[in-house]
Image: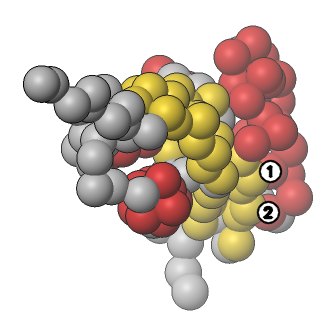
Amino acid sequence: MANQPNTPHRPDEDIEESIADLIRSYPPLRTSRAFFTFASLRGQVKFMGNVRTPQERHLLAERVPHIAGVQSVDVSELYDDEQVRFAIGKLLPYGVYATVHYGAVALTGRLPEGMSTETLLEQVRAVAGVRLARAQLSSPQAQPAVG
């Protein structure tokens, strides 16, 4: 495969070291580093995992292409907590709340009648970017009989 014009060929190890330098230079990315991975294969860089904010994801998508030797950047499997929270929010019934921390989801609140915790957790775990999901939900209280 031929390199694109004006793009110098660099070993993938050097590209990855330049990306690691970029990550170390930005404190929020440094903090998120344990929750995502990246690799370069012939200058095609792919990120996978979770970051805390959309700004971190954006920074990688915007700055990494400017690193010498990078041919392309794929962040399609890099998820930020806001993106995950919005996707989960579409699934949650009224009274159930989600907290997301690097793709780990905690559900709290009151589960509506007729819905099971396991069913809801299965739906949440199927959302792209969710690493794990736990729930501490209360069941609906039986209404006292009037009369």
Marks 1 & 2, CB-CB < 8 Å contact: yes
Query: Number of callouts in the render?
Result: 2
Is 31 placed above or below 143 here? above
Q: Which residue is nearer to you in this view: 12 or 85?
A: 85
Disc 1 element? helix
Is 87 placed above or below 62 here? below
Regarding residue 70, the answer to whether it shows in the image is no
- Residue at left 42%, top 57%? 116
Residue type, numbered disc 1: Glu
Image mark for residue 117: none
Query: Where does residue 45 sit, x and y in percent of width and height?
Result: 62, 59
Image mark for residue 16: 1
Outermost residue toward the bottom in this view? 1
Disc 2 element? helix
Query: Where does residue 88 sit, x and y in percent of width and height?
Result: 36, 44
Alpha carbons under labels 1 and 2: distance apart: 6 Å
Image quadrant occupied by the C terminus: top left
- Residue at left 71%, top 63%? 40
Residue type, numbered disc 2: Asp
Query: Where does residue 58 sit, x and y in percent of width and height?
Result: 45, 31
Q: Which residue is nearer to you in this view: 50 or 111?
A: 111
- Residue at left 73%, top 61%? 39
Q: Quadrant of residue 87?
A: top left
Q: Quadrant of residue 144?
A: top left
Image mark for residue 12: 2
Sort mark 2 into few (<14), some (14-19) or many (20+) by Cα contacts within 10 Å: some
Q: Quadrant of residue 24?
A: top right
Outermost residue toward the top in this view? 27
Is 68 placed above or below 21 here? below
